[in-house]
Image (spheres, rainbow, N blue to C red):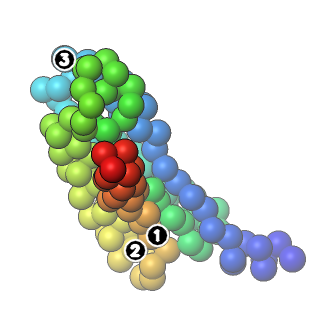
Amino acid sequence: MNLYLKNTNLFFYQMSPFSDVNNILYPCLLQELPKFMESLVEQMSVNLNRIHSLGINKVAVGLLQPIGCLPALNIISLRTSCIGTLNLVSKDHNKKLVEAIQKLNNQAGKSVFVTLDLYNTFLSTIEVMQKERDG
């Protein structure tokens, strides 16, 4: 029974967008953002390897949603639309994470890790809601 469950488990892994936002919003960190994002992706890779080493054969990794569209940031900045600069941060992070996942899959010799594109899913949902609101 355990072997069956072990071979069919699906594990979902995602980083909280709020931990990113808290770090990105500090002015001293803006200059160090590329190093921070690189270390974050490296740590996520280590974590994903650990998860796989536990016998999980399929790991879904959620990409970062557009953090420039988070309601908390729009309220703080008194904006009614997404903050494009912060969305670029999400895009850059996701690009690096996808590259890291491809590397992990190559090392595993099979597709253990798959990504869930939360970035475009969130943007699409926001666009639909705005169209419905504007009527």
Q: Where's the N terminus, which quadrant?
A: bottom right
Q: Secondary structure at mark 3?
A: helix
Q: Residue at x 54, y 66 (%)?
A: 59
Which sits earlier in the primary sequence, circle 3 or circle 1? 3
Q: Is residue 28 above or below residue 41?
A: above
Q: Residue at x 52, y 54 (%)?
A: 13
Q: Secondary structure at mark 1?
A: strand
Q: Nearer the viewer, mark 2 or mark 1?
A: 1
Going by the numbered disc 2, the residue's amino acid type is Asn
Question: Does residue 6 appear anywhere in the picture?
Answer: yes
Q: Left or right: 75 with respect to 111?
A: left
Distance, label 2 to label 1, CA atoms, is 6 Å
Question: Does residue 86 appear anywhere in the picture?
Answer: no
Distance, label 3 to label 2, CA atoms, is 35 Å
Q: Residue at x 56, y 72 (%)?
A: 58
Q: Is residue 67 above or below residue 57?
A: above
Give the residue at mark 3: 28
List the single residue furthest toward the front.
135
Give the residue at mark 2: 105
Residue contact between numbered discs 2 and 1, judged by CB atoms under 8 Å: yes
Q: Is residue 100 above or below residue 132?
A: below
Give the residue at mark 1: 113
Going by the numbered disc 3, the residue's amino acid type is Cys
Q: Quadrant of residue 52?
A: bottom right
Whole-percent x and y of residue 69? 31, 38
Going by the numbered disc 1, the residue's amino acid type is Phe
Whole-percent x and y of residue 77? 25, 20
Distance, label 3 to label 1, CA atoms, is 34 Å
Q: Residue at x 49, y 50 (%)?
A: 14
Q: Quadrant of residue 106?
A: bottom left
